[in-house]
Amino acid sequence: MNITAIHGYHLAFQLPGPIGNSTGFFDRREAFVLRVEGEGGISGWGEASAVQQAVSGYIRQKLAKLVLGKPAHETGRRYAEMTEGFGYDRQGTAMLAVSAVDMALHDAAAREQGVSIATLLGGRLRDRVPAYASGPFFQPHGDPYRDFEHDAEALLKRNFKAIKPRCGFTPEADGRMALALRRLLGWGNALMVDINQGYTVAAAVESARHMQDAGLLWIEEPVRPDDIPGYLRMAEASSTAIAGGESLSTLAGFRDFLAAGCVSVLQPDLSICGGYTGFRKVAALAEAYGVPVMPHVFGTVVNLMSSLQMAATLKAYRGGAMAAYPFIECDATHNPLMTLTGSIDPEKDGCIAVPDSPGIGLELTEEQLAPYVTEHWVERI
């Protein structure tokens, strides 16, 4: 099956009110999803997580000609051709664009064969993946943590057994928040926190000290992703596992991150690190270092379902939680782009079942996207 058309969809929606993290507040979300269309009407979906307009332009100007008229199943060959033309942009817009295209080609190829992505990649190692809630987020004006206990209770009712709130307000406030959530969750549920790169190293170390008695599973992105010495200082100073990697895009970037020994949990994002082809390279590299890998997800249902398929194929690690890694991240905020085809909350055991239907297991239509589309383009043969 050859690819006959590529569709790009710029999506956006307004939040009911502003939410935030250590770096600031926002009240609008944007996303970019890609659909490749093949002979016989078969489609495949992909996503890019950032700089949507730039990614869109790069695909239309650089990548479309490498994909149109070519077989969907030649994913490795397409990846090589797309990445060979990077030039100076080896770790930004170009890799985000490749990520979306690689994801979509895999989805189309799997649908053509009538198998799931996990089967296409060699077979799944698990049928269910433990889920963790990504949230709650800061509230503006006053104590940003004031609603966290109420929000966490709501997440428990949705069957989440692992919760990752945002933190990074002040080290003392972080500690009070983490201890309060631990009392609420008990010791049978997992608690981790995400600083979102917002602290200096000294503040991150102090925050970890104040949160130590909360029994955190990990502290995520304590400092900026290119501050490897900072990550290393954080890892050496804290007994809590350090997680990161969602902002990295190149294999060399992950190599340096792992070689420094500064993370205990690696979180590549399919929509940033090169799709399935790039992610599998990162996972193999991490396995050589004995570091567990789990997908970072914060965008639309396309990335969530794609990442669920990827998680089903990953090596298992015991990381100190109620279940073995990998986990799957679920955006717990108001996000209609995550519920385009219905709710995907975990079941009573805290896990999400991995679909065995063709592709990523998502039947998405343009009509479902329509309320959120701000721009739609098509490139054809």
Image (spheres, helix red, strand yellow):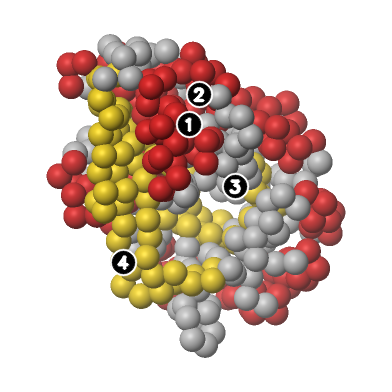
User: Is residue 98 visible to the viewer in this orientation of the structure?
Assistant: yes
Amino acid bearing label 4: Gln
The earlier-in-sequence mark between 3 and 1 is 1
Secondary element at tag 3: loop
Question: Which structural element holds mark 4?
Answer: strand
Q: Which residue is mark 3?
A: 247
Marks 2/1 in contact by CB < 8 Å: the verdict is yes
Please tell me whether residue 290 is drawn above or below residue 105 in the rendered image.
below
Amino acid carrying label 1: it is Val
- What residue type is disc 2 on? Met
Q: Residues within 10 Å of mark 4 (few under 14, many from 20)?
A: some
- Mark 1, Cα crowd under 10 Å, few <14 / some 14-19 / many 20+, is many
Residue 42, x across and y down, in percent: 22, 22
Calculate the distance from the C-alpha at mark 4 to the C-alpha at mark 1. Answer: 28 Å
The residue labelled by disc 1 is 98
Q: Earlier in the sequence, mark 4 or mark 3?
A: 4
Say which amino acid is labelled 3: Ser
Q: Which mark is residue 14?
A: 4
Q: Nearer the viewer, mark 4 or mark 1?
A: 1
What label sits on residue 82 in the rendered view? Answer: 2
The answer to whether marks 4 and 2 mark residues whose Cβ atoms lie closer than 8 Å is no
The one nearer the camera, 9 or 152, is 9
Q: In this rendering, which labeled residue sits more in front, label 4 or label 2?
A: 2
